[in-house]
Image (cartoon, rainbow, N blue to C red):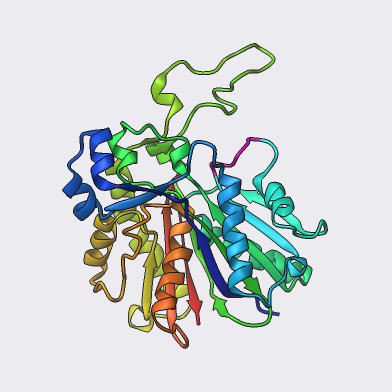
């Protein structure tokens, strides 16, 4: 029994933040943010809004979009997030309750960032096949606004908040090919948030040991290191993925890269000799929404024209450092 990607939906916060406002916070040039980084707009959660609220909106949007799918049909729920509401419990448990999913559902979180959707797809597909499940949800939700400083030029100019819900089904949809995975933990401090967990807990049996270093209490990104990592690792991952699937570059109709920024997607295009039509950038209004960029991009591209009969290569890369590349056959 083959598991397939049957549908997508997403949710975004109501708050729209323009490049000019981000420029005022960070001192960066608004034209550079809008045209070079490629995000004239992005969305941020409100102060009282939580990641689980956004993830729940994406799940409910999926049910609205596909009325043939009912909450009681869901047998598994995987949530990709490194910025959940709480360290404990897992956000998947919150979404199971908030979205009215049955209590027999298998619900778990996957702590991955920009590669998370591709990883989650492979993991959920394998578990569905092992257990004989027919319908499952993969939710991606990483609102970095909850851990960023508005004054930090490296992150505030790039990231935005969104969540996506992907329906996996045994009945119909795009088949998922073999996946290439990779990890290089030597670069882990290139994109990191240190405060509040085991290395710098808020409290412990040894007393309050939370870091007092302000930079440890916000998301840190070395943009140049991430860019170098992408150019070093992603083309080779694409080559290995194609070989695993018995394909070559001309066999791929569409390349959907993690929408890290317009500049980074353009660099990948140049290195791989692809056109903007072959490897589009479509999240200008949302910002880099981490693990949700690939499913939202595919949803938008699919809404603009059928992908029926096409081979789509999806490649996610970033925090970890981690990467994953797969093929979807629509």
Q: Residue furthest front?
A: 14
- Residue depicted at x 45% and y 26%: 217
Between 185 and 218, the residue placed more toward the observer is: 218
Where is residue 154 drawn, in percent x and y? Answer: 30, 38
Q: Is residue 84 one of those drawn in magenta?
A: yes
- Residue depicted at x 57% and y 15%: 209
Q: Main secondary structure of the magenta part?
A: loop
Q: Is residue 124 above or below residue 152?
A: below
Where is residue 23 drawn, in percent x and y? Answer: 23, 39
Would residue 34 be found to the left or right of residue 142 on screen?
left
Q: Provide the residue span drawn in magenta.
A: 82-87
Quarter where residue 44 is shown: top left
Please tell me how many numbered marks the rendered image carries.
0
Would residue 107 be found to the left or right of residue 198 on screen?
right
Would residue 13 be found to the left or right of residue 172 on screen?
left
Q: Is residue 11 above or below residue 28?
A: below
Camera sees residue 320: no
Camera sees residue 168: yes
Q: Is residue 305 above or below residue 108?
A: below
Where is residue 245 drawn, in percent x and y? Answer: 48, 77
Where is residue 293 drawn, in percent x and y? Answer: 43, 59
Q: Is residue 76 one of those drawn in magenta?
A: no
Q: Residue furthest top?
A: 207
Could you tell me which quadrant the N terminus lies in?
bottom right
Between 243 and 285, the residue placed more toward the observer is: 285
- Residue depicted at x 24% and y 59%: 267
């Amino acid at each position: 029994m083959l598991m397939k990607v049957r549908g997508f939906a997403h949710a975004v916060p109501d708050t729209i933040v323009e490049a000019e406002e981000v420029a005022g916070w960070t001192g960066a040039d608004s034209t550079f943010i809008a045209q070079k980084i490629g995000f004239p707009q992005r969305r941020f959660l409100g102060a009282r809004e939580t990641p689980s609220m956004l993830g729940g909106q994406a799940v409910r949007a999926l049910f609205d979009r596909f009325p043939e799918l009912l909450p009681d049909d869901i047998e598994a729920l995987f949530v990709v997030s490194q910025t959940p509401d709480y360290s404990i419990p897992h956000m998947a448990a919150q979404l199971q309750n908030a979205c009215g999913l049955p209590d027999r559902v298998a619900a778990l979180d996957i702590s991955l960032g920009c590669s998370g959707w591709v990883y989650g797809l492979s993991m959920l597909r394998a578990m569905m096949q092992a257990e004989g499940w027919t319908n499952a949800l993969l939710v991606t939700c990483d609102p970095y606004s909850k851990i960023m400083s508005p004054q930090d030029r490296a992150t505030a100019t790039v990231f935005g908040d969104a969540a996506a819900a992907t329906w996996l089904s045994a009945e119909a949809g795009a088949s998922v090919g073999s996946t290439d995975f990779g990890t290089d933990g030597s670069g882990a401090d290139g994109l990191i948030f240190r405060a509040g967990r085991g290395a710098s807990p808020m409290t412990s049996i040894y007393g309050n040991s939370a870091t007092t270093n302000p930079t440890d209490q916000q998301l840190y990104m070395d943009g140049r290191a991430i860019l170098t990592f992408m150019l070093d690792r992603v083309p080779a991952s694409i080559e290995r993925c194609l070989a695993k699937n018995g394909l070559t570059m001309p066999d791929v109709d569409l390349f959907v890269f993690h929408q890290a920024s317009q500049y980074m997607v353009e660099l990948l295009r140049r290195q791989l000799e692809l056109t903007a039509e072959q490897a589009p950038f479509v999240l200008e209004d949302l910002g880099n929404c981490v693990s949700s960029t690939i499913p939202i991009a595919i949803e938008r591209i699919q809404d603009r024209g059928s992908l029926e009969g096409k081979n789509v290569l999806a490649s996610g890369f970033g925090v970890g450092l981690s990467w994953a590349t797969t093929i979807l056959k629509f």
